[in-house]
Amino acid sequence: MTPERWQEIRDVLEKALELAPEQRSAFLNQVCSSDLFLRQEVETLLASSDDVRSRFLQSSVLRVALKPGTRLGDYEVKSLLGSGGMGEVISRNWGQKLGTDGTYPDCLLPDVGICGPTEGRKPLTFVRRSHPSLKALESGQMRIPKWLVLAIVVPTFWGIWGGLTEIPEKWISPPFPPTLGYAVWSFTMLPFAVIALKKAQWKLELSRRAILYGCAVGFSGALGQLILFWVLTQGPAYIIFPIICLSPVVTILLSATLLRERTYPLAATGIALSVPAIFFLSLQEPVNSPVHGYTWLVWTIFIFFMWGLQAYFMKSSAKCISSEGLFFYMTVTGIALAPVAVLMTNFAAPINWGLRGPWLTAVIQSFNAIGCLLFVYAIRFGKAIIVVPMVNGLFPLVTIVLSLVLYRSIPTRYNLSGMILALVAIFLMAFDEVRHEPATKPEMQALSPAD
């Protein structure tokens, strides 16, 4: 950790400590929106005891001051022998005292070890460890980050929803139309919006920018779904879905260029593999679907861009609106468009109004609603260029597996290829990001001989 980084963490920590606990999350959303590592460091310190926070600040000061002549217990810094991505090697002069039990005296400086003592010889160097992954591995505290947990939970919920949503629409007679299913879904968002607002202490951002962002996210997703209902009556689904499902490409490009999100080589390879994986997973067998002109293709491309923009707006809005506020506006816009879905419904056809109609649909759509809320958190905690392709690659895979179990629906060879590519891509993205994550807890170990 550099002196500049320590100062940055200290400044944010001190400001956060001045706020009430319930106000800190919104504050960190604003100041750490583009720096997840900074947020994790500050959150870890906030959750720690006063003693840990004090020791962290003191140790950072010592770290900045490792110059020739600096005393560290019974050690004295002599010179810097070398440094690199993992830390620094420092030559030292040995003092006169040893502990009464023959051990080396403790030192309050964290991330410092003693390099290579051999039997019968005193160690000659300090090793100051600075690479976050190395520190986490040494302390045994490398944990799965929140964004990764959510990036697995979200597609699980959405995959279950995708596998079950056909039951009231196709497997029950009379069916419950998908347009009314949309209306039911919009209202299943309400209880989760209430839970989210309660978590935010009932505080809702009302600035013009916050409202615009919230409506942009809500309308881009909900309006795209309504347009899709119409598009599927005009064009072939086996062409429409592969185009729409590639919308993460828009999110990745915008996040990389405008938000300056970056990743590592293996994760970048995973992102590249996720695109064909999503495409193959969405491919369907050609059927004799009605085709009416080419207007449906234009609207399909429009949906492609809208859904890509939606995920980008979720991330770019972090500085002006909380995750909870954003989901609230998504809920409001979804309900606002429900009458449009009702008007699109063909009420001349038989509709199931019993328990297996709207009520079963409500249970199934709840998986979609909670997935939407957790998706907002996933994007806020992680990088959009990683989270979006992971979620969009994993949830069709869950749906395909569930459909195989429920309906004995055998995946096509393209779907199988997509499943393999998706698993490889998800592993590469998750592995490369997690191994570069900083330690989730500041190290407060005493100076001791290396094993």
Image: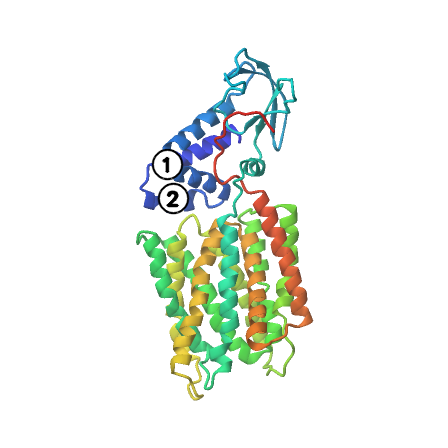
- The answer to whether the residues at label 2 and label 1 have Cβ atoms under 8 Å apart is yes
Asked whether residue 110 is in view, the answer is: yes
Question: Disc 2 marks which amino acid?
Answer: Phe
Number of on-image labels: 2
Q: Where does residue 321 sit, x and y in percent of width and height?
A: 39, 52
Q: Residue at x 39, y 77 (%)?
A: 358
Q: Residue at x 36, y 54 (%)?
A: 208
Along the horizontal axis of the image, is 272 left or right of 147? right
Query: Is label 2 in a helix, a strand or a loop?
Result: helix
Quadrant in which the C terminus appears: top right
- The foreground one among 274 and 355 is 355
Q: Which residue is mark 1?
A: 15
Q: Where does residue 299 sit, x and y in percent of width and height?
A: 55, 71
Q: Which residue is mark 2?
A: 27
Instruction: Kindly report the distance in space between the C-alpha atoms of the residues bearing marks 2 and 1.
Output: 9 Å
- The foreground one among 278 and 92 is 92
Determine which of the numbered discs, if any, sits on residue 32 in the image. none
N-terminal of the two: label 2 or label 1? 1
- The foreground one among 435 and 84 is 435
